[in-house]
Image: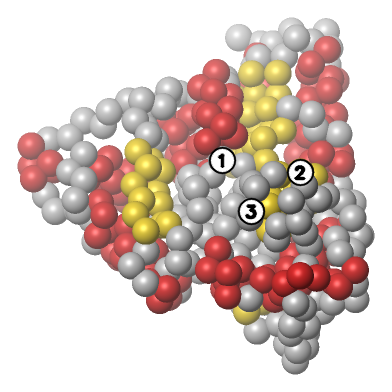
Amino acid sequence: MWADRGVIQRPARSQSEGCGSVCHVVCWRATPPRVTPEERAAPVPTADALLLFSPAGLDGSAPSGSPVQERQTGMLVSQLACRKSAAPLLRCRLKMSQSSAASARPSSDLVAFRKVFLRSQNIVIITGAGVSAESGVPTFRGQGGFWRKWAAQDLATPGAFSQNPSRVWEFYHYRRELVLTKEPNPAHQAIAECEAVLAKQGRRVTVITQNVDELHRRAGSKNLLEIHGSLYRTRCLSCGHEASNYKSPICPALEGRGAPDRDTEDARIPEKDLPRCETCSGLLRPAVVWFGESLDSDVLRQAEEALERCDLCLVAGTSSVVYPAAMFAPQAADRGVPVAEFNTEVTPATNSFQFHFHGPCGEILPLALCCHRAWDAEPEN
């Protein structure tokens, strides 16, 4: 399926240019796009054109047109201009986006979806922040997406952690403690139940989530790929050891810290009192994918393999603007796999999918997936 995956990256030249680490773009395509000689000779798309395709990070995508997104996009364009092989792919995706409005509207026929579902043997379910938002987990996006006076993209970077690990740990401590008070909602539960029942039928469900809250895991999902990591895993900056960590608080110095109010002062916790590695006493960081960081290659490979063998793909609660996950479902659709989107809004990818069901995931997913209980149902041709 993934005939072409390119990772284009370079170190940032200065702290003001980005996160201080690496900015990257990951591109996939199922088959090489057909490109005319005229298209191949055309210039690489501009930064404005690439805003739809610029990557963001796990903790909330940069709003369209924001300084962060424009900065990331400009860096990508400067690199893609040096890679002639990338230009045809980007032009192909841009052409698809521009023509999507003219394509057929996706179906909202639940009966038709269930017929496809009953025939499917390998199902991939991709979930985003919208699913967890229904459990009361903040998305840190849009106008209200701030912790104190900082947006997520100001905190969720290697540079921010290097400059002020105390502030970043306060932010993640707040999120860890908050999520512990939340419960999986009917969407999480329907997905987990679907996986369990279909496994008894010899069918497979793989959940690929962009969320870091582990609510899918708590709901009972087993075949789960957390492509952006977890709030409840840590990684040592010294020895690299990574492990689950459910301590509450994660260290004594963070107890009672992390209040999100705008006028709250930083705790300024000394580095020696922040979470430390039990193996080497080095400083720990959250084991999540920050802005400017690449996804774990092993997790990404497993996601690619699941998408390659799937014969049905569901997309729930994701805005389809955070890359590389935003490419997963459209690429499945490109090779003829039925894709069903469940969302409270239309996304940039909606018109490339066979189905779109409008509404809260906690309401519509259970209705769509309840047909898995029809053990003896014969799929209709």
Asked if the residues shown at circle 3 and circle 1 are in contact, with their CB atoms under 8 angstroms apart, the answer is no
Q: CA distance from mark 1 to mark 2?
A: 15 Å
Q: Please tell me whether mark 2 sits on a helix, a strand or a loop.
A: strand
Which picture quadrant has residue 108? top right
Q: Check disc 1 and give the amino acid type.
A: Asp
Q: Position of residue 115 (x, y in %)?
A: 67, 20
Q: Please tell me whether mark 3 sits on a helix, a strand or a loop.
A: loop
Q: Quadrant of the N terminus?
A: top left
Q: Position of residue 380 (x, y in %)?
A: 66, 11
In this figure, which residue is indicated by the disc labeled 3?
238
Q: Please state which of residues 22 and 70 is positioned toward the viewer in this rendering.
A: 22
On residue 296, the disc is 1
Foreground label between 1 and 2: 2
What crowding class fits label 1: few (fewer than 14 Cα within 10 Å), some (14-19), or many (20 or more)?
some
On residue 243, the disc is 2
Q: Earlier in the sequence, mark 1 or mark 2?
A: 2
Q: Check disc 3 and give the amino acid type.
A: Ser
Q: CA distance from mark 2 to mark 3?
A: 14 Å
Q: Check disc 2 and give the amino acid type.
A: Ala
Task: Let me know if residue 60 appears in the view.
Answer: yes
Q: How is the image coloured?
A: secondary structure
Q: Position of residue 41 (x, y in %)?
A: 8, 45
Q: Please state which of residues 343 and 322 is positioned toward the viewer in this rendering.
A: 322
Foreground label between 3 and 1: 3
**Relative to 239, does residue 136 appear above or below in the rendering?**
below
Task: Let me know if residue 92 appears in the view.
Answer: no
Q: Please tell me whether mark 1 sits on a helix, a strand or a loop.
A: loop
Q: Please state which of residues 41 and 108 is positioned toward the viewer in this rendering.
A: 41
**Relative to 13, does residue 57 appear above or below in the rendering?**
above
Q: Earlier in the sequence, mark 2 or mark 3?
A: 3
- At x 49%, y 48%, the residue is 294
**Relative to 42, does residue 66 appear above or below in the rendering?**
below
